[in-house]
Amino acid sequence: MINIENEQKEEWMVDPEAQYETAYRELLYSIMENNVVRNDRTGVGCASTFALGLTTDINKYFPILSGRKMYEKIFKSEFKWFINGETNIKSLQDAGNTIWNEWADENGDLGPVYGHQLRNFNDQEYDQLETVIEAIKSDPDSRRHIISLWNPNQLKDMALPPCYLYFQFFVEGDNLNMFALQRSADVFLGVPYDMALFAQLLLYVADKTGYQAKTIDVKFIDAHIYKNQREAVTEYLEEDFSSAPTYAYGDGVLTLNNYQPGKVITAPVAV
């Protein structure tokens, strides 16, 4: 699909404080070098690779891209929407976030999607978020600190089945780590914002349980780049990038420091 010279790849490795974006670019490169071409649900077509991953330590730096501009209002509003258990897009739109507009019905409803399964699983008032927080407090060594958003009973009622569907937390001394599983990953448009949401989730749970947020390990089962994103991916990979921004987190508020984004690079959303 796209050829990236080895010299250009080596430049990505220079700054140890930019390891997250380096790993993200390697993810794009892996898909472009080793893929199968698929006729997907959207009809756009994509290049897909099986079971790729990203691991990042958020103890000091927040996982956000600087080689192209990302919008804080998008990942902050979506995270708030998620943990509040909302399934209507009004609060997202009020925050200037339109990423779910294409899937919502005429009333702005999406059905029992992500937040619903998090806070009211299967309409049974089972709050997975509060349950896992209390479990980490009371039994930190448990191997059952799990949140699952995949509910076969209600898939038919969802505008879109969850793409990220599983989280597991692991206490390591004073640190809290998190594994996430994503069945389907739009690596260029979706994954950067997914990673920012995952980081906020780990920070939130760590804050509620008294631990230090540390490692996020994410596995993408179907990692793909859509055909209509090729030019945008090429443009992004030709841009320089800087160190990841540091951050402060307290009382549920995330503040990024020294975020120096590049230009806006857009691509069509495959619906």
Image: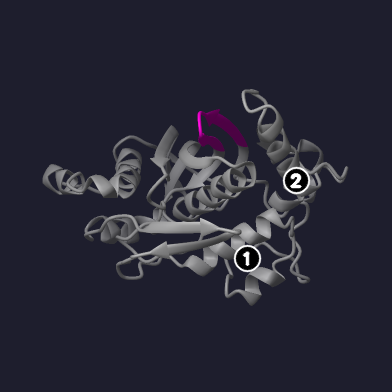
Q: Residue furthest left?
A: 7
Local SS, label 1: loop
Residue bearing mark 1? 102
User: Which residue sits at x=32%, y=42%?
Assistant: 23
As drawn, is 236 to the left or to the right of 155?
Answer: left
Corner quadrant of residue 223 = top left
- The answer to whether one can see residue 8 in this image is yes
Identify the mark nearer the N-term, 1 or 2: 1
**Main secondary structure along the magenta-highlighted residues:** strand
Total numbered circles: 2
Q: Nearer the viewer, residue 156 or 212?
A: 212
| Location of residue 188 in the rendering, given as x and y in whole percent from the top left corner | 41, 53
The mark closer to the camera, 1 or 2, is: 2
Quarter location, residue 266: bottom left
Instruction: Give the residue displayed 74% in from the left and 59% down from the top.
Output: 87
Residue type beneath disc 1:
Glu
Residue 150 seen in render: no
Query: Which residue is located at x 55 percent, y 30 percent?
Result: 171
Residue in the foreground of this view, choosing between 20 and 225: 20
Residue at position x 27%, y 48% from top? 17
Secondary structure at badge 2 equals helix
Establish if 86 lies above or below 19: below
Q: Which residue is mark 2?
A: 117
- Mark 2 residue type: Gln
Query: In the figure, residue 180 lies in which quadrant?
Result: top right
- Is 2 inside the magenta-drawn segment? no
User: Distance from label 1 to label 2 (Cα)?
Assistant: 21 Å
131 horizontally vs 186: left or right: right
The magenta region covers 167-181
**Residue 1 drawn at (x, y percent):** 29, 47
